[in-house]
Amino acid sequence: MAATRSPGLDSGQLLLICAAGMLTVAGISHTAAVGLVDSQVAIGFGVLIAAGELARLTMPGNREVAPVSTAASLGYALLLDVGGREATQSALQVVAVMSVGMIAGALPHIAVGRPPRLDAMARRLLAGSLLAFAYRPVAHPLYEVAAAGDWWPALGVMALLIAVMLTADVVIAAMLRSEQVRTAFGVAVRDEIRMAAPLGAAVAASGMLLALASHSMDLTALPAFAAPLLVTQVAFRKYAGIRATYLQTVRALSRVTEVGGYVEPGHSRRVSQLSIAIGRELGMPEPQLLELEYAALMHDIGQLSLRDPIPGGATVLTDPAQARRIAELGAEVIRKTGVLHGVAEIVRRQCDPVAESPPAASRIIKAANAYDDLVGASTDRDRAAAALERLRLDGGTEYDPMVVEAMARVVDRLTMTRL
């Protein structure tokens, strides 16, 4: 699903990046002043962090992740010993190794014109730093207990601090996302838990296992654990690529009605963007927003069955029975794909009156489609106000009043942004 983003960084992103920048300067300066403790281990983990940043990928929702880099960072922060030798690096050295590794892994991407997202890198650094500052002060007592043969206290502390770190990371991500895509904070938290937390938990567990494996495997634990993580990352990359290709296919299919002259150019795209904005305004979670986007892009595909196109493709001006017939034909086309049954049902019911309780996505598409039929690509405020007033005058029979008011807020915000 395409996420709307402002051209520059918002205040939350800038604050996050500044905090990560200060941590980086502090960590590197401290390490340069006191010297690198156990340099071979630090370099080994730094190389793995750099390799992970080099292999970063973008997940659905425009989320940039680097699972191998994050697991290596957490493993270095949680390290108790390496082959029986106590790991005595400070929290600031952990920050320095993470920072240098991330920068080194990002440089090849920058050289070929694919710069990483600074806010995503800053989040990864802050998450690892939070764990390091909480864990390194208690690492020596835990090592002494573990050296005596009791690893359970160390495991308990590791698991507890990782849970705190993951919770903090989800909250920070939700705060940033709620500002970027203009959705409620509670909805953003649920989305992050659903979309990002499972991968985060797997990466955190891998980092914990990497730290524990270094006790008996020495630095050979790095390549041994990196290999399966890289294989998993390849699978995630393929999944993200398939999902992106799927959306591109739907977008291309939605343009068939425009190429055939059934609707105005850009109509499907505008209805889709407006529908997603309304869905976010109403607090819809990401999985529902994705279905809404698919359905909005293909809501007019049933017009291909018409012998004579509707003037301007404006179904809001046509006979309700014909509009419903178009919706049913479009749903039948979508249903034949075999994988978009939910989307087909949304399209089929987009013309149902409010009294028949159509799905929320259907009510949103109906209102967004009517608005675009009346306004089109125009940016005239008076025309937009007149279209909204016309929908309000319906009295809640055909158009859901909550959807219309949410759309009014979205349109007003978009108008102010253009001005």
Image (cartoon, helix red, strand yellow):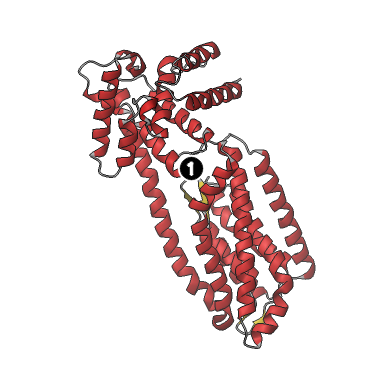
Which residue was labeled with disc 1?
Answer: 285
* x and y, in percent, of residue 93 in the image: 71, 67
Relative horizontal placement of residue 247, taking residue 134 as reference (left or right): left
Q: Quarter of the image containing the C terminus?
A: top right
* x and y, in percent, of residue 41 in the image: 63, 74
* x and y, in percent, of residue 305 in the image: 21, 24
Which image quadrant is residue 314 in?
top left
**Residue in view at x 43 percent, y 24 percent:** 368
**View extreme (bottom): residue:** 148
Q: Secondary structure at mark 1?
A: loop
Question: Would residue 118 be visible to someone looking at this image?
Answer: no
215 or 191: nearer the viewer: 191
Which image quadrant is residue 212 in?
bottom right
How packed mark 1 is, by other alpha carbons closer than 10 Å (few <14, some 14-19, many 20 or more), is many
Question: Would residue 209 be visible to someone looking at this image?
Answer: yes
Q: Quarter of the image containing the N terminus?
A: top left
Up/down of 281 relative to 186, above or below: above
**Residue in view at x 68 percent, y 79 percent:** 142
Residue type marked 1: Pro
**View extreme (left): residue:** 307
* x and y, in percent, of residue 275 in the image: 45, 30
**View extreme (front): residue:** 355
Relative horizontal placement of residue 117, taking residue 143 as reference (left or right): left
**Residue in view at x 65 percent, y 68 percent:** 77
287 or 394: nearer the viewer: 394
Up/down of 225 relative to 364, above or below: below
